[in-house]
Image (tube, helix red, strand yellow):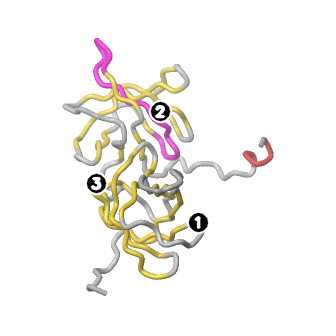
Amino acid sequence: LDRLAGRLPSPDRDAPVRLWVDRAFSIKGSGTVVTGTLAAGTIRERQQLLLTPALAAVRVRGIESLKQRAGAVTGVARVAVNLRGAVAPARGMALVEPGRWVLSTVADVRLGGSGERPARQLTVHIGAARTVAQVRVLGGQIARLTLRDALPLRVGDRLLLRDPGAADGLGVTGATVLDLAPPGLGRR
C-alpha cells in the first residue's frame, strides 16, 4: 500500500475548492461548522465560498485539520470549517469557490460494469451527495443522466450509480462524467 500511495499524483493546490459536506452542526459561541474531506485546492480563513445547491454566500471564519487550527489547508485533508453567513448546511451539500464551478442537472457519462442495460432511474452518489437520476442509454456504455438536484460536477468525475430496486440488493456500477453541457436529444 505504501508503494501504491507513493505513486499517486500530488493534489493540485490551485484546483477549485469543492468540499462535500458530510456533517453540519452548530457550536455555541462559534456558529455553523461543516466537516468533509478536501480532495484538492486550498481553503483559507476569510475566503468566500458558495454553499450549493442554494448558491448561498458564506465566509470561512476558521479552519481545523486533525484537531489543529490552521489559516489555510490544502487537500488532501480532513477539515472542519467554521462558516459565517445565514446558512443551514446539510449532508450532501458542497462548498465551492465562486465562479469556478457550474451546477449541472444533465450529464453524459461512460458507464462502468458488465454492460447490462441500467435501470431507467438510479441513485447517484458523489462525495457525500446523493440524488436521483433518470437514465437514457445513448449507445454502448454512454448514457445521459438527468439529475433531480443540481450538483457541482467536472468532466472526469467518478460517480457511483445504485439501483435501489435491484433483486440481489447490489445493483451498483460506476460512471465517469464526459460532458456537462450535452446537446439536446430528439425523441429517438
Q: What's the CA distance linking mark 1 and mark 3?
A: 25 Å
Pinpoint residue 95: horizontal percent, then vertical percent: 35, 42
- Foreground: 93 or 161? 161
Label ID, residue 72: 2
Q: Position of residue 94 (x, y in %)?
A: 36, 43
Q: Tell me the kind of residue under disc 2.
A: Ala
* Residue 125 magenta: no
User: Badge 3, how many Cα within 10 Å: few under 14, some, many 20+?
Assistant: some
Front-most of 77 and 147? 147
Provide the residue span drawn in magenta. 26-42
Compared to residue 6, the image places residue 88 above or below, namely: above
The residue positioned farthest toward the front in the image shown: 167
Q: Quadrant of the N terminus?
A: top right
Q: Nearer the viewer, mark 1 or mark 2?
A: 1
Q: CA distance from mark 1 to mark 2?
A: 39 Å
Q: Earlier in the sequence, mark 1 or mark 2?
A: 2
| Type of amino acid under label 3 | Asp
Left or right? Give the position of 52 relative to 86.
right
Please tell me which residue lies in front, 159 or 70. Answer: 159
Amino acid under disc 1: Gly
Per the image, label 1 sits on a secondary structure element best described as loop
Q: Is residue 67 above or below residue 134?
A: above
Who comes first in sequence, dot 1 or dot 3? Answer: 1
- N-term mark: 2 or 3: 2
